[in-house]
Image: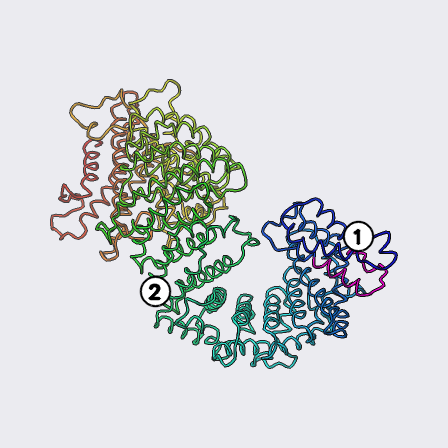
Amino acid sequence: MASQERVVGRHPVCLAFLQLLSAVAETFVEEVQEDFLACLVIVLHDIFPLHHQWPYVTVADRELIAHHCLLIFHKLVTLSKTFNPQALGSCELCVYSLLHGDSGQALLRLILAGEASVTRAIEFEGSQQSDILLMSVRLSFSLLNRLLLLGAPVASQSPLEKRLLVSPTQSSAACVVTSLAHFVYLRFEPRLCTLALQLLKRIAKLYPMSLLACLGGVAQSFRDQALLRLGKLTEHVRLKVAILQLLTVCITNQPGVSQLFLGGGDKQDNDSLSPCLESVLKILKIKKEGVYYCPSDLHEASVEVVHAIWACHQLRAMESLKKNKDFWNLLCFPLLEKSVSSQDVLLGAFILRTMALELYHSKKSVDPQLKSIFEQADKEGLVKDWSKLVHSSLPQEEDMDCSVDLLNTSNIKGSLSSAIFLLASWRDLCMVLAKCTHIKLPSSAKEAILRDIIHSLKSVEVLEKFRISILLSELYLILLNQWGSECPSAITTWCKSSEHLFNSLASGVTALHPRLVLWTVAIASSTARALKKNRRKEPTDGFHLTDVRHLVRPLCQLLKYYCRKSMDELGSSNLLSVEVCTALVVLLRDVLTVEDIASSCFHTLQEFLVIPVLADLLFTSLKVQKDYQVAAVICHLFLSLASITKFADELQGCGVVGHVSSVLSSCYAKDSCKGWPQVYQLFVQLVTRLLHTLRHFFVEDAISFVVLHLDRLHSCLTQVRRNPCNVEEALVTCHLVFNIVVLRTSWVSDGPNPMTTLMRGVSSATSAAIAYLCRPSLLQHLVEYKKGSITKAVLEEEEGHTKRQLSTEEVRDPSPQLLEAKTKLQELLAICLICCQQFSPGVSEAVSDQGLDVDHWQPIVRLSFASPSLEQEDALTFGTLLAAAQLCVKSLTKTDRMQSPALGTKSLVGGSCLTRAERSLVLMVLEVSLSISVSQAILYRLLPTVPPREKQFLSRELGAEMGSVKMQVQRHLRRGTPASPSSTRSSLQVSLDPSSEWSLVQLFINIVDKVFK
């Protein structure tokens, strides 16, 4: 060929060689054959790029060589799932050479010369040469379209793509886009015009270039010609479809061309439809009335244009279309027919999503025509048919979903992509309807929708297709949360089906996509919470609440697998399995607490080693400091189980506390994120719960934990004085201290006693809490202006008020932040006082006939009656305890002074009426503070080491303070009783019911009167 034919100008061998390759090309599309690849390289590098430079005796030979080369390439370049740019095959070799080699430039030359080729074909019309010329142009268009599609995923642009994207203003060379646009005028060959428009659509979709700029001055004439051919009844259907598809892509990706088509002419009236929209409505009207034949693909393309307008929120076009009274009927009539279940899948998807978008954008009111569509559908029960259409379109073949990448849609082909799009559109519509206040679906329709979703999820074929099953699970979860109260049967239906579904998930756990498990678990969690909220004890439709125990076994199987997988993923950036594990732990906790079935499920959890595996995951999460959510939910689960003795024994036997305590300090490190301190607090609560359940058997483990984290436990108690806003950790710590103090006789400390350090912190927290509660204005300043320092706040308060020992004036209109802070401080004060009470003798023991063993007790209260201070670290004093008592008495008696029982009792936290629990808490603080004061005062009186002068000082001051409390209590008790002539200032005693809430307080007052005279 090189030595003879290219010299003489006759090419019989070359043509025969190309015909042979063309005949066998389809055989080697997927099969790798070295001899064929060598021949293909010759065609790509020697024949096709240079054939136009060869001498020809017959000009037709050049066209035949180009035609055979294009035919070979077209047979090899196929849109196959097996295409891999990194592989070495005939298709991959062809694509790479055409994109990066000289063959691609030769292909562009043929496309640019397409108009001339068509002109010559018209001259030779009816001859073989004419057919070859037209076929070559069609092959070049189709081949370039496929090349652009296969080359799009590559990040860097190839030389072919760079040449393709050159606009007329950037180079003097011919513009490919302009050349393709000229084919819209071609009426001799409609297929060429269709291929040219499809190629323009591909360019507009894949590349960030302005088609309007490339079209330049021919843009308006191109639009007019396209709309002219779109409006003709005799035009080829495929050409009309290509025009509509180009318009759809331009609406999405080319705003310039979109405005050119949708805006109409320069003098277009704003109230009238543009010619483009008129043509679309005309097609819809023809399809509905059936006067002329309208193919389904043309109807679908028209509806897709409308959908693109709503999806891209083309407001002007939307308003123009909605002004047409028949628009919604023309658009939605396929879904209002009795044969709705047999409608085209994509057509139904576009209509449903357009309706969903319109409802979503309609904030205040819904278009009356669209509302009438839903009313008609409701009246005729068509919503159920829409649901049937969606679920009947789901594919049933098992091999259609081969990818698990949710974001990769490149290898979804055929009916699967249509089914997913229809399902996604149905999901969007249902989500909007669930929150739309203008359109209400009947309960029967809602139950039918939920029932169809459950039926599809139970299908094995659907469950194996991860995209579809994930969409179904997502939709069911959203609708269940919105419609669960209106459709109680849906919860029962799910519960009856959940066992089968979770068993299916557990049996194929290694092959499932984690996101499918995540959504399914989320649905089950919502159902479990709804069951706990309703608390129906009687069976409903054959289902009892205790039947949820059947979910525990598959849950344990899933949890065991994903826990081990999560421990591997915590070291990487992909934490999807960790999210699944978090959801599974939450669901397991919800299921175990539905009807307190945890005890009956103990052996199941033990069989699958749930507690040891979760403990290892908790340890790993704390060690690598990743995903505090999973650590938090594990602690919550352990907390719920620790109240049961056998689970507490299991937690202790697995060494959870000792294993995790070694890495727990990372939670409160300076560089830890916001969520880790909460994990630390939860773990402290877990230690407290285990100690409360196991008592003496867990004391050593609890003491080891306290010794390991003693500095943190002590610092959080002393931090209350510096920052009253963060008392949560102090509350948790005080509960732990109380449980240890109660069992302090069960252990002996060899070294320094950690309880001494903790009780110093408890005393500091007690005085700080009382000091803040006595100064509500200061507390409000610190709560609402957290950036200010405490010293500055104290100075401001002292400057604004006259000097006094106790500032208990309530803040007018306290903020929610202040009320919350006061409530927490009151709870902290109560638990701190109870801790201190454990180290003080009881009042009954102190005043008994047997006497008090003074060698067994040590004073814990300093002999001082000064007001509680915030400027220095004060220990617990008599002044602090009596200030707390005064505050409680004032809180309990304040509203009684108003002589209005309807107003209720003002709380210690201020501004709100005391509930029964709050009143009990205030009374407890009052009684405990007085109990400690009286018992410690008696202890001081009996201690021989206390000087007599201090004892006299104690008697005088305590008597005066208790006299003040006595006056307030007696005044409160006398209020409302009939006046008596015998009542005098010196006689303040009132007969008291022994069952009264004030009886114990009155007893303390009487003891002080008699002991400290």
Q: Residue at x 70, y 66 (%)?
A: 135
Q: What's the CA distance linking mark 1 and mark 2?
A: 67 Å
Q: Residues within 10 Å of mark 1 (few under 14, many from 20)?
A: some
Judging by the rendered image, the residue that carries numbered circle 2 is 445
Q: The magenta stretch spans which residues?
A: 45-71
* Residue 962: x %, y % from top left: 25, 38
Secondary structure beneath label 1: helix
* Residue 244: x %, y % from top left: 59, 70
Judged left or right of residue 834, residue 138 is right
Give amino acid for label 2. Answer: Ala
Q: Residue at x 64, y 57 (%)?
A: 149
The reply to whether residue 965 is visible in this rendering is yes
Q: Residues within 10 Å of mark 2 (few under 14, many from 20)?
A: some
Judging by the rendered image, the residue that carries numbered circle 1 is 46
Quarter of the view holding residue 844? top left
Instruction: Tell me which numbered mark, 1 or 2, is placed earlier along the sequence.
Output: 1
* Residue 234: x %, y % from top left: 60, 79
Would you say residue 263 sits in the magenta stretch? no
Q: How is the image coloured?
A: rainbow
The reply to whether residue 896 is visible in this rendering is no
Would you say residue 61 sits in the magenta stretch? yes
Judged left or right of residue 600, residue 986 is left
Q: Front-most of 151 and 91?
A: 91
Secondary structure beneath label 2: helix
**Residue farthest to the left?**
981
Quarter of the view holding residue 10? bottom right
Give amino acid for label 1. Answer: Asp
* Residue 440: x %, y % from top left: 36, 68
Q: Main secondary structure of the magenta part?
A: helix
**Residue farthest to the right?**
7
- Residue depth check, mark 1 versus mark 2: number of the one nearer the observer: 1
